[in-house]
Image: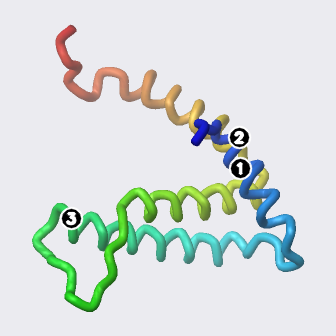
Amino acid sequence: MTKKTLKEIQTEVDQYIGQFKEGYFSPLAMLARLTEELGELAREINHHYGEKPKKASEGEKEIKDELGDMLFVLACLANSLNIDLEEAHDRVMHKFNTRDKDRWTKKEE
């Protein structure tokens, strides 16, 4: 499997959604989906690292699959709002590297 840039992920998601008449859901509907996927991720992390074991009737899921679901919905939301996730990432990293550069204790080299 080849590595993909965020731009390539957004393009792949857009091509997938573009084949359907319904197109993208509304931003509020996608926010609800993103919240739903976050809940599923939280549940899996709680099962793996928390104190709440799965019920015998619950199927096995993987954390990476839940993160993949979140990435898909996030790409849908960004695409529907014409937001370039690479640009958004660059902006937030600039913020962390300037405003928050001395906020945390750095490891010694």
> Does 105 appear above or below 16?
above
Q: Nearer the viewer, residue 77 or 46?
A: 46
Q: Label 3 amino acid? A: His
Residue position for label 3? 48
Label for residue 10?
1
Across and down, in percent, residue 46 comes to 22, 68
Mark with earlier residue (2, 3): 2
Q: In what element is the residue under mark 3? A: helix
Across and down, in percent, residue 31 comes to 58, 70
Which class describes the residues within 10 Å of circle 2: few (<14), some (14-19), or many (20+)? some
Mark with earlier residue (1, 3): 1
Q: Label 2 amino acid? A: Lys
Across and down, in percent, residue 48 comes to 21, 64
**Which residue appears at 20% of the width and 18% of the height?**
107
> Does 28 appear above or below 95?
below
Q: Are marks 1 and 3 in contact (CB under 8 Å)?
A: no
How far separated are the C-alphas under marks 1 and 3?
Answer: 30 Å
